[in-house]
Image (tube, rainbow, N blue to C red):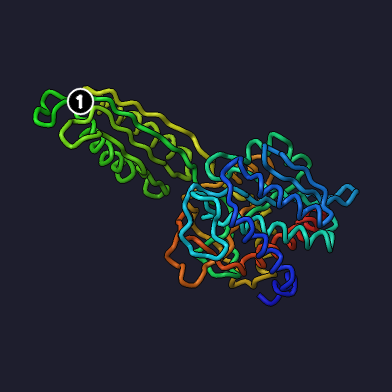
C-alpha cells in the first residue's frame, strides 16, 4: 500500500471519501441518477475536465484529450443503487427511503473521479475517457451508452468492482470468462381452483409449482456437464390467497447462471420441455417465459496483461490475485467488451466486522481505503496502457 499512498495522498483520499458518502446518502435507482450525475458533473467541472451529461438519460462522460493522435483508454464506473432499505446505522446512511447503495457503486464513482483528478494533474500522454454509467443493476445501462457513442475512438476499456471476499490492497484478475450469463425466467401455472376438502375436483397450482421447483433442480444435477458451472435458483413463488381453497394460479420466478453458451441453451430447452410435460401430466396450463440477461464478461488477454502488470507494480505480486474460476454473478460491463478489448477486475474491500455480510444486503458496507487503491490503479492503468499501445 506504500506506493498507492504515495500516489493518492490523504487530501485526495478524503475528497473521494466525502464524495462517496454524499452519493451514499442520496442513492438513486436505475436511470434516475439525477443527483448523482449532477454531483459528478460538478466535480468534473471543478477539475477542468470537459464532459457531457444526459448520456443514455442520466450518464456522464468526461474526456481528457491530448489534442494529438494517441491511444484512447476508457474507464467505467456504475452509478445506480438498489431498492433496499438500509440498516447499517452509518452516520451517512441513505436518506432516500427504500433505496440503498448496497453494492459499492458509490465507491466506484468516487474512485473514478479520483483517477480523473490524478490524470488531469499529470496527463498520461494519451486520451482518457471517463464513463459514469447508469443502470447496471439489471437494466443494462451499458447498451444505451454504447449506442450513444461512448466507445467511439476508444482502443481499450477497463473497469472494476469492490469485492468483500478480499482484503484492501488485493487486486483480483481473471483472464477469459470472468462472469456468467444472467438469464431470468418466469413460469405461470393455471390449474382449476376449488374447495380444499374436494381436491379431486381441482387442479392444484401449488402442487404443480412444488413439482416444478424440485424437478428444475435435477436439470443441474443430472442434465448439465458438471465441468460447466451452472446455477438455477427460484427466487419467487406465489400461489393462493386463503387456507381452505386449492389455488388456481401460481407464479415462479428465477434465474439461470451459466458460463458456457451450450450449457445455457441446454438449460433453457430443458426448462421449456419440463413445463410442457408437467402441463400434460396435470392437465394444466404451464407457460415458460425466458428473459435473456447480460452476457458474460470475457476479459481480453492483452488487456489482462496490462492490468496484471499495473496491479503487481502497485500492490506487489502477492496482492495481484489470479482468479482461477469465474463468478456466477453478472455485469453489463460485458457489453463494452463485445465492442472493444478490455479487462474487468475486483478490488478487495473487506471491512472488519462485515466479513459475512454480502452485497445486496441492507447491512452492506466496505472499507473506504479501497478508494485509494481504485484511483491509483485506474490512473496508472491509463498511463501503462497508453505506453503499451503506443509501442504496437
| Residue 75 in sight in this render | yes
Where is residue 85 shown, x and y percent of the image? 47, 52
Q: Residue at x 58, y 42 (%)?
A: 30
Numbered label tally:
1
Q: Residue at x 79, y 42 (%)?
A: 153
Which residue is outermost to the right?
67
Is 259 above or below relative to 92? above
Which is nearer the eye, 105 or 35? 35
Which residue is outermost to the bottom?
2
Which is nearer the eye, 204 or 42? 42
Density class for disc 1 (Cα within 10 Å; few <14, some 14-19, many ≥20) is some
Q: Residue at x 44, y 62 (%)?
A: 357
Is 94 above or below relative to 253? below
Task: Classify residue 68 as left or right of residue 342.
Answer: right
Where is residue 277 shown, x and y percent of the image? 26, 27
| Residue 309 in sight in this render | no
Q: Which corner quadrant of the image does residue 24 belong to? A: bottom right
Q: Which residue in the protein does label 1 denote?
A: 193
Task: Classify residue 98 as left or right of residue 197.
Answer: right
SS label for mark 1: loop
Q: Residue at x 78, y 53 (%)?
A: 44
Where is residue 239 shown, x and y percent of the image? 27, 35
* Quadrant in which the N terminus appears: bottom right
Which is nearer the eye, 220 or 190? 190
Where is residue 29 shown, x and y percent of the image? 56, 44
Task: Classify residue 126 as left or right of residue 93.
Answer: right
Q: Which corner quadrant of the image does residue 233 belong to? A: top left
Amino acid at each position: 500500500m506504500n506506493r498507492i499512498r504515495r500516489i493518492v495522498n490523504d487530501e485526495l483520499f478524503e475528497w473521494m471519501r466525502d464524495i462517496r458518502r454524499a452519493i451514499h446518502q442520496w442513492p438513486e435507482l436505475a436511470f434516475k441518477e439525477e443527483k448523482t450525475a449532477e454531483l459528478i458533473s460538478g466535480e468534473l467541472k471543478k477539475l477542468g475536465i470537459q464532459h457531457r451529461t444526459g448520456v443514455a438519460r442520466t450518464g456522464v462522460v468526461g474526456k481528457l484529450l491530448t489534442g494529438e493522435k494517441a491511444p484512447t483508454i476508457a474507464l467505467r464506473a456504475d452509478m445506480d443503487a438498489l431498492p433496499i432499505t438500509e440498516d447499517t446505522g452509518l452516520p451517512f446512511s441513505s436518506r432516500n427511503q427504500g433505496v440503498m447503495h448496497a453494492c459499492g457503486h458509490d465507491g466506484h464513482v468516487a474512485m473514478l473521479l479520483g483517477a480523473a483528478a490524478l490524470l488531469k494533474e499529470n496527463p498520461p500522454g494519451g486520451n482518457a475517457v471517463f464513463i459514469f454509467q447508469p443502470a447496471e443493476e439489471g437494466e443494462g445501462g451499458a447498451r444505451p451508452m454504447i449506442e450513444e457513442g461512448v466507445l467511439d475512438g476508444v482502443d481499450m476499456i477497463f473497469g472494476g468492482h469492490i469485492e468483500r471476499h478480499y482484503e484492501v490492497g488485493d487486486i483480483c484478475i481473471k483472464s477469459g470468462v470472468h462472469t456468467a450469463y444472467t438469464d431470468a425466467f418466469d413460469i405461470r401455472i393455471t390449474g382449476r381452483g376449488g374447495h380444499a376438502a374436494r381436491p379431486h375436483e381441482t387442479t392444484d397450482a401449488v402442487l404443480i409449482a412444488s413439482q416444478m421447483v424440485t424437478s428444475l433442480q435435477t436439470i443441474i444435477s443430472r442434465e448439465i456437464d458438471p465441468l460447466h458451472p451452472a446455477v438455477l435458483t427460484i427466487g419467487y413463488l406465489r400461489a393462493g390467497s386463503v387456507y381452505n381453497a386449492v389455488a388456481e394460479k401460481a407464479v415462479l420466478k428465477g434465474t439461470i447462471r451459466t458460463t458456457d453458451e451450450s450449457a445455457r441453451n441446454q438449460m433453457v430447452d430443458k426448462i421449456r420441455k419440463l413445463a410442457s410435460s408437467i402441463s400434460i401430466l396435470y392437465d394444466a396450463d404451464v407457460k415458460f417465459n425466458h428473459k435473456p440477461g447480460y452476457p458474460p464478461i470475457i476479459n481480453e488477454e492483452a488487456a489482462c496483461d496490462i492490468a496484471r502488470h499495473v496491479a503487481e507494480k502497485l500492490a506487489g505480486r502477492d496482492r495481484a490475485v489470479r482468479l482461477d474460476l469465474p463468478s456466477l454473478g453478472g455485469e453489463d460491463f460485458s457489453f463494452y467488451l463485445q465492442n472493444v478489448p478490455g479487462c474487468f477486475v475486483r478490488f478487495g474491500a473487506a471491512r472488519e466486522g462485515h466479513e459475512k455480510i454480502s452485497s445486496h444486503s441492507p447491512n452492506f458496507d466496505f472499507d473506504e481505503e479501497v478508494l485509494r487503491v481504485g484511483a491509483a490503479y485506474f490512473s496508472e492503468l491509463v498511463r501503462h496502457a497508453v505506453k503499451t499501445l503506443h509501442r504496437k
